[in-house]
Image: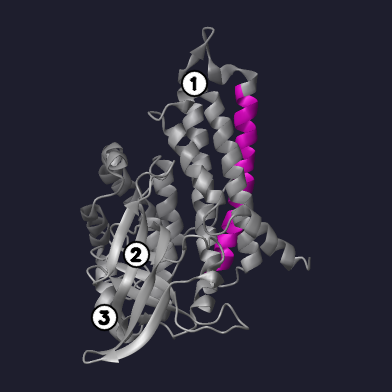
Amino acid sequence: MRRDLFTEDHEAFRELSRDFVEKEVVPNYPQWEQGGRMPREVFERMGTLGMLGVAIPEQYGGGGVSDYRYNVVLQEEAARALVTLSTVRTQLEVILPYFLHYANDEQRARWFPGLAAGTLLTAIAMTEPGTGSDLAGMRTTAVRGVDSEGPHYIVNGAKTFITGGMQADLVIVVARTSTDPDNRRAGLTLLVVEDGMDGFTRGRELQKMGCKVQDTAELSFVDVRVPAANVLGDVDEAFGYLGHNLAQERLTVAVGSVAQARSAIAAAIDYTQHRTAFGTPVASFQNTKFELAACSTEVEAAQAMLDRAVALHVDGELSGADAARVKLFCTEMQQRVVDRCLQLFGGYGYMMEYPIARLYTDARVARIYAGTSEVMKVIIAKSLGL
């Protein structure tokens, strides 16, 4: 179906993104899968091309354009080429908004040029062993102190499932700075822990069934001295900050789900047109046609819902409940479509040498991170007064 979401400027950015992905990413992707990450110099090339700093103010080397649709274009072009861009999506769509909304002028001058240039990589450390989706139950602590070097916080705790944790130069750590027995959500603060700070260590690099080109780590903080100048936003107000960006976090998962489902259909069409069974192209069988027709219909329905949500988000009008609806629908659709497309590959669909296998394993986490499908249903149900 015809889409009317993008302008000429977005399409120009699409051409830039497509060219970069085809020349810089696709030829090297198998090697990156083996190594478990995208090399730092690739982030820097993206920074040089202006792909990482679109939303960062011009005075710090960015484009100064606050328009989420550029992020959508970048995701779609990576999916079209059957690859991912490592932790770029997390950095641009999940982490950067915290810096943009809550960094003060001194912090902006210190960090924004590197973020735009791709020389500073980031992670956000929320999840802890045993807490999962219960952000209010965090046990990592940050105790304020003062010494000869000035005010600071001593951070102690452990975090897990941290995307980009092995490469990050800046880690936004959510820690408890105070306790209110009557309000578990109060008392959380964002602190930026920098690579090289004493007591900050990276533990295991976790081995995942999918998403092989983005590292996922366990992080440990033992008496890490973090200057008070590294507090992001106001002390004790982090829970509200985390909720502020949830709609975009969930929307970005949906964007990836729809784009990857569309790519799965394209891969299945190509494969079935060239693969023969009983002397006939698999694509000529009625079952193949029916399956792909049904998959295409699901993707187009999800795309229409998603594009509407993106437009609302750009206008600042996307509600949390609607973001939950979009994530729930698009991620569940992705799983169904990719599974049905893999089936058309037969035994070859189970082989990792075919991109459909990677699309299948990558898709599974979409129904878990940024809030599970079950959490999305709870949010939607509350919006219905249930």
- Residue 315 seen: no
**Amino acid type of disc 1?**
Gly
Query: How many other residues sit within 10 Å of disc 3, few (<14), some (14-19) or many (≥20)?
Result: few
- For the residue pair 188 and 279, the one nearer the viewer reads as 188
Indicate which label's residue lies in the foreground, 3 or 1: 1
Residue 63: x and y in percent read: 32, 70
Q: Secondary structure at mark 2?
A: strand
Residue 230 in the figure: left or right of residue 134: left
Q: Which mark is residue 347?
A: 1
Q: Earlier in the sequence, mark 3 or mark 2?
A: 3
Rendered view: 347 above or below 19: above
Are circles 3 and 2 on residues that touch, CB within 8 Å? no
Indicate which label's residue lies in the foreground, 3 or 2: 2
| Residue at the right extreme of this rendering | 386
Query: Residue at point 78% right, 68% down?
Result: 385
Q: Please provide the residue range marked out in magenta.
A: 288-314
Q: Earlier in the sequence, mark 2 or mark 1?
A: 2
Mark 2 lies on residue? 220
Query: Residue at point 65% right, 55% down?
Result: 374
Residue 311: x and y in percent read: 56, 63
Q: Is residue 94 magenta?
A: no
Q: Which mark is residue 109?
A: 3
Where, quadrant-wise, is the N terminus in this rendering?
top right
Residue 165 in the figure: left or right of residue 272: left
- Residue 10 seen: yes
- For the residue pair 267 and 4, the one nearer the viewer reads as 267
Query: Residue at point 61% right, 25% down?
Result: 289
